[in-house]
Structures are given as C-alpha cells and as structure tokens.
Amino acid sequence: MKKNYIFTLLITLCLTGVSFGQEMLLNGGLENWDDDTSPTSWTKAESLTKITTEIHGGSFSAVRNGESGTKDLGQTITGIVPGESYTVSFWYKVTAGDDKDARIWCTWKNGSTTVYHAGDGNNRSADILRGPEDGYLDNNGGVWTKHEVIVTAPAGVDRFYYEVRSYSNSVTYWDDLSFIKNTTASVKNNAIEGFATYPNPITDKNFTISSNSSNTKQVAIFSVIGKKVFSTSFTGLKKNLDVSTVNSGIYILKVTEDGKTATKKLVIR
C-alpha cells in the first residue's frame, strides 16, 4: 500500500511538470566507512573519526578532534554541465576552537585545472565557495548548523571538487553533506489564472500565494525526493503562509484551484 502511494505521488507530480534534483555526491550522509577513519567514496579524509554520539542524521558522523594543522574532507564530482544550477550543502558543528575553525573550500574543475567561481584564487572576497567570501563558518554556539549555497557551473568545466575544511585545535563535526543538480519545476501553461508567489527565495519563513480567483486553493510543498512537508488550503484572492515548520532547502510548491494546477520551485532560506 505504501509503495503504491509513493508511486502514485511521484507520477502525479511528474505529470504536473515537476522534476526533482539529482544528488551527485557519494556517501554524503557518512553512513558507509572502509574503516573508522576512512568514509567510503571520499578521496580525502584527513584526521577524521567515525562517531555515533554526535550525529545530525543517520547513524554516523565524522569528527576532527583537536589535532593541529588544516584538515580536509573532499570528493571530486564528475558529470558537471556548464550553465546548470547546483546546490552545495552540509551540516556542521564546532564545539571547540577560536572562531576560525571551519570553512567551505570547493572549486570547479576542467580536468585537473581549477576554475574559480569568482576572483582569481588569490582574491576570494567574492567567492561563496571558498570561506565563504574568504571568511569562516559561524560556530553558532556549538549546535548543528546547515550551510547551503546555490551556484551555476561556469563555462568550460566538467567536474566539481567538493571540500570542507577545519583548522588547528578545533573540534568540528560533519554530517549530511550534499551536492544536488537542480532541475527547474515548470509548467508549460500554468492553468491557474493570475497565479503568483512571492518572495522566492523565502527568507523569513513567510510567503504569499495569489491568483485572480477567490475560490479555494489547495497548497502542498514537497521535498526534492517527493515527500510532502507542508499542506494547507485557503479561500480568497491571496494569503500569506507561514512555513516556519519547514527546514531550509529547495522544494516544489503545488497549488490546485478549481481542478487546475500550478507548480513552482520554491527556495526556503
């Protein structure tokens, strides 16, 4: 019964023009390990240890536990398409250090040649993939925190080097790392007359849906793997909706009114 429901849901969404993002990072959840210091599929894993006591999701996370020097966790991702949009994200937690403890440190590649997202490699003040902006991630009081950026692959690249970095004497945890190729949700002809949503991205957990009709609107938000994470309905020309119960990320919004459907990619920050 459950399998039939999921299949029906995915078919329904596909028929309304929705396509989901593709996860391209291997073992981003750190659930598979070759041994206690080597997460499977990661080409670089320096001074990391498998741990079960401090996790964000699943059964395992990785910790860098106070060693000296710069330590990296990295993986090369192939199959990059110039001009396509990608979402880079991960969860981290820093419980000891000096506020200069962890960074995102990714770059685009053309074969083995580095292609910087912004700047020239020496001037990283505009590069969201390095630092970001040559800074450090907020330690945020030692709680699990998600970092996410959306980037477009520049011309002439065919791969992406995904790396997170930690620094001397910090205690830094990593979990649920992800690199998703985004696909745009589109409908050739939005059937709902005057359909609009704003703002998008959503930055304060509130957004508005409107149309030309005051008839009842059924609203649903789905994750990129097809899980419904929010649903409601309202009657009227427009309504402001509170989505504070939905985690930050990329979602698919589906609105139905009088048997007509509109879909849209929705970004919640």
Image (cartoon, grey):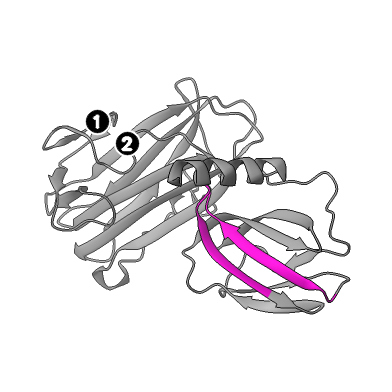
Sooner in the amino-acid sequence: mark 2 or mark 1:
2
Q: Is residue 216 a member of the stretch shown in magenta?
A: yes
Q: Residue at x 67, y 57 (%)?
A: 254
Question: Which residue range is magenta in the image?
Answer: 214-233
In the image, residue 175 lies at what x, y percent? 29, 50
Dot 2 crowding, Cα within 10 Å, few <14, some 14–19, many 20+: some
Considering depth in this image, is 158 or 261 the residue closer to the camera?
A: 261
Residue 169 versus residue 242 in the image, above or below: above
Considering depth in this image, is 137 or 69 the residue closer to the camera?
A: 137
Q: Residue at x 87, y 65 (%)?
A: 194
Q: Is residue 225 visible?
A: no
Instruction: Return the residue at label 2.
Output: 27
Q: Give the structural element (helix, strand or loop) at label 1.
A: loop
Quarter holding residue 91:
bottom left
Tell me whether the residue at label 2 lies in contact with that at label 1, contact meaning CB atoms closer than 8 angstroms. yes
Instruction: Return the residue at label 1.
Output: 40
Considering depth in this image, is 254 or 224 the residue closer to the camera?
A: 254
Residue 205 versus residue 9 in the image, above or below: below
In the image, residue 108 lies at what x, y percent? 50, 34
Q: Is residue 59 left or right of residue 139?
A: left
Q: Is residue 40 left or right of residue 263?
A: left
In the image, residue 182 lies at what x, y percent? 59, 42
Residue 5 versus residue 155 in the image, above or below: below
Q: Is residue 44 a member of the stretch shown in magenta?
A: no
Q: Is residue 159 visible?
A: yes
Q: Look at label 1 and name its amino acid.
A: Thr
Specify the quadrant that holds the N terminus. top left
Q: Residue at x 47, y 43 (%)?
A: 122
